[in-house]
């Protein structure tokens, strides 16, 4: 009865982590769960860029752009 009340308190469980691990290993409900290992960061899928596309990107990034003002000042139209 004493052990049940200890395991009902999550802070008391921190005092006996080995008992928690053993309880998880014995748990039928946990053993029935389906699981799989996912490692999405093992091999990142970065698409290869052709030389032509890379050249175009460098040209666009290096180009200076002059923006037209969206609104004319009130003084210019008066």
Image (cartoon, rainbow, N blue to C red):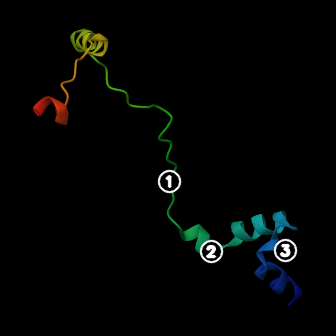
Q: Where is residue 61, by image quadrant?
A: top left
Q: Could you classify mark 2 by the number of other residues whose Cα lies within 10 Å: few (under 14), some (14-19), or many (20 or more)?
A: few
Q: Label 3 belongs to which residue? A: 12
Q: Quadrant of the C terminus?
A: top left
Q: Could you classify mark 3 by the number of other residues whose Cα lies within 10 Å: few (under 14), some (14-19), or many (20 or more)?
A: few
Q: Residue at x 18, y 36 (%)?
A: 74
Q: Could you classify mark 1 by the number of other residues whose Cα lies within 10 Å: few (under 14), some (14-19), or many (20 or more)?
A: few
Query: What secondary structure is found at the residue carrying circle 3?
Result: helix
Q: Is residue 16 left or right of residue 53?
A: right
44 up-or-down from 12: above or below: above
Q: Residue 55 placed where, x, y %?
A: 26, 9
Q: Is residue 20 left or right of residue 33?
A: right
Q: Label 2 belongs to which residue? A: 28
Examine the rendering and report whether any part of residue 19 can be seen. Answer: yes
Q: Are marks 3 and 1 in contact (CB under 8 Å)?
A: no
Q: Is residue 72 left or right of residue 61?
A: left
Instruction: Please identify the residue farthest to the front as the structure is shown.
Output: 78
Q: Residue at x 28, y 18 (%)?
A: 49
Q: Residue at x 50, y 53 (%)?
A: 36
Residue 36 is labelled as 1
12 up-or-down from 37: above or below: below
| C-alpha span from label 2 to label 3 | 23 Å
Q: Are marks 2 and 3 in contact (CB under 8 Å)?
A: no
User: Which badge, 2 or 3, is on the more N-terminal residue?
Assistant: 3
Pick the front one: 62 or 48: 62
User: Which badge, 2 or 1, is on the more N-terminal residue?
Assistant: 2
| C-alpha span from label 2 to label 1 | 18 Å
Q: Quadrant of the N terminus?
A: bottom right
Query: What secondary structure is found at the residue carrying circle 2?
Result: helix
Query: What secondary structure is found at the residue carrying circle 1?
Result: loop
Q: Residue 32 placed where, x, y %?
A: 54, 70
């Amino acid at each position: 009865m004493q052990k049940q009340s200890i395991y009902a308190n999550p802070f008391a469980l921190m005092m006996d982590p080995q008992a928690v691990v053993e309880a998880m290993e014995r748990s039928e409900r946990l053993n029935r769960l389906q699981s799989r290992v996912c490692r999405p960061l093992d091999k990142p899928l970065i698409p290869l860029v052709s030389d032509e596309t890379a050249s175009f990107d460098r040209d666009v990034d290096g180009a200076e752009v002059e923006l037209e003002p969206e609104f004319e000042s009130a003084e210019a139209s008066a």
